[in-house]
Amino acid sequence: MNVLEIQKGVAQFSKALRSFWFQDPTILDFTPKVGPKSGGTAVTIRGEYIDAGRNITADFDGFACLIKREQDVWNETTVRCKTSRINTTSSAKLRMHFDGAERLAPDSKSFRYTENQTVKSINPSRSFRSGGRQVNVTGTMFTSVQEPRMVLSSEDGIHVGQPCQVYSQSSMQCLSPAFYSGDSAGPENNDITVGFLVDAVEDLLQLDLDFTVVSDPVYFEFPEEGNMKEQSGKQLNIRGSDLNLACTSEEVHVSVGQAECIVESLSDVQLNCVPPEEEPAAVNKTGSPTRNGYPEVRVEVGYQSFYIGYLKYRRADRLQTTTTIVVVSIIFLLVGIVATIGLGVILRNKIKHMDKRMDLANGIPKIMELTEMESDKRFQLLDYGDYAANMLFGGKNHDLVLNTSKKRTPADSRCLEDFRSLLRDKVFCVVFIRTLENRDDITPEDGSLIASLLTVVLHKEDHLMHFTEVLKVLLAEVVRNAVRGKRNAPLLERNNMITEKLVFNWLSLTLYKFIKFVVGKHLLRLVTSVQHEIEQNAEVTEVDIVHYLNDK
């Protein structure tokens, strides 16, 4: 390119070292599209040639969005800016200026300023100094912020945690930050202010909520030589100090190699867990082989990881193996003899039962034909309300649910509505049910009644959809625990009594139409026929009926 230069009144052409190009900046999109009215939301703008010019500015309907000129977010297709504070909630259009030239975002793209976030409660309200404890937070407008973080502050400074996990508008989960102050040697520190770093919402930096930081738990290594512990019994015991000052058994993870040792109890000085029945591979937590050929035991709580030692499973030698083979062979021989003797008895009884089944095969169909018209007339399923009351409460009249005429005070109504709002949150509902199941003072009868009351509330939300989603989370957790435990035990045990009743209630409610319109009258005919056959033939028993139905 030739450039006209004027030097000392003399004009001449010279070659330009760089070319100059005219570009047309275009805004294509931006994210996020929502943020608090206090500002501080980092907005990423995407487009074409949006770095053209020296003086580049951005705003939302006149409210400045301060552009960051860092290299990683400043190029021809990407620019990042931070929103400023406004006084009202509204929607605004993005506008950019490039050396005076104005460009607007597409009409369909707008930014919505929301009310500032609030925090109502945190649970638990204690953590250890090294941090990393999961804290459940309830409040409002959580989904309209980016990377909220928990903050602990004192005279020594501010300690900021990792980004929180937002689950809904009213629920998020944060990890407590590490907090080491000048008096960290003491058992606990109450002179702490808890808050949250949420964009530019300054009101959340210091909250009037109680929070205590206690000393870290300490887990001791196995005292045996080489930290090698020989496994005996079903439980593995690990000693320590201050283990449960700010921790529950569900928050501690113990690994044997890369397998899990399921924690069953946790006291101030001891942890008890159930190791895998079969010896895991001789590796550590990360999968690296150990030098001594045994799996490494490690405890993890919060951000801390404790090396405990190695677990040695009992390994049988050749003599034990040979003895086992001989014993097994003798057992098989004895079983063969007993089976031969018993086979004759079984065959004799089988012939007898076959005769009975022939009689049933001839008798029951004839009776079913005779009772078909009678059962069709008798079959009349209850309406859905009465059917649900019978299935949920066993036919008992529970005034707490069924009596809608009982007057409530305004305070009672508000409390019930707040509780119902909480139950609409899937995370809260699951945690609420698990908390109730972990209580020792709730009897099976109480658990059944609680499950039925929850069914009534959840059933009203989205026609069983919300109920189904909660049940899926509960059953997934039960299955995961059963798989990790590798134990031959019922899937739903004593501590799953509410979940078990919820499954029964869900099946009962969803099968109503199928029973009423498809199989109800057929089942009534079958039951009527079976009862008639038992009354007419004294030699026929319930066991014979079961065998007959299985053959069918």
Image (spheres, grey):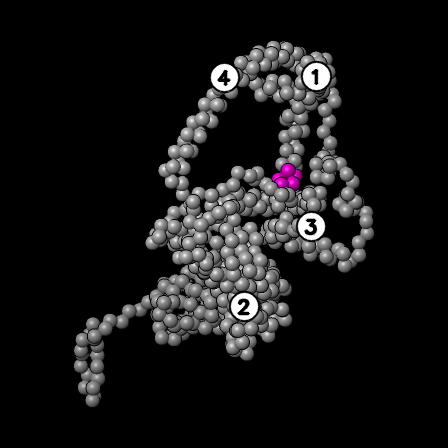
Residue occupying image coordinates x 59% and y 74%: 191
- Could you tell which of marks 2 and 3 lies nearer the N-terminus? 2
Q: Label 3 to label 4, Cα distance in Å? A: 52 Å
The amino acid beneath tag 3 is Asp
Residue 348's x, y, as percent? 57, 12
In the figure, is residue 45 to the left or right of 368? left
Disc 1 marks a residue whose amino acid type is Ile
Q: Which residue is mark 4?
A: 340
**Chief secondary structure of the magenta portion:** helix
Q: Which residue is mark 2?
A: 215
Secondary element type, mark 1: helix
- Asked whether disc 3 touches disc 1, contact meaning CB atoms under 8 Å apart, the reply is no
* Image depth: mark 4 or mark 2 in front: 4
| Residue 449 screen position, x and y as percent | 71, 44
Q: Distance between the Cα atoms at labels 4 and 2?
A: 68 Å
Judge whether 280 appears above or below 127 on screen.
above
Q: Quadrant of residue 140?
A: bottom right
Q: Who comes first in sequence, dot 4 or dot 2?
A: 2
Q: CA distance from mark 2 to mark 3?
A: 31 Å
Sequence-wise, the earlier of marks 1 and 2 is 2
| Residue plotted at (78% across, 58% down) | 410
Question: Do the residues bearing badges 1 and 4 touch, measured as CB atoms within 8 Å?
Answer: no
Q: Is the residue marked by circle 4 packed among few (<14), some (14-19), or many (20+) residues within 10 Å?
A: few
The residue identified by callout 3 is 441
Mark 1 or mark 4, whichever is nearer to me: 4
- Mark 3 or mark 4: whose residue is earlier in sequence: 4
Kindly identify the residue that appears in the image at 47 percent across and 58 percent down. Answer: 300
> Circle 3 — which element?
loop
Tell me which segment is drawn in magenta: 500-505
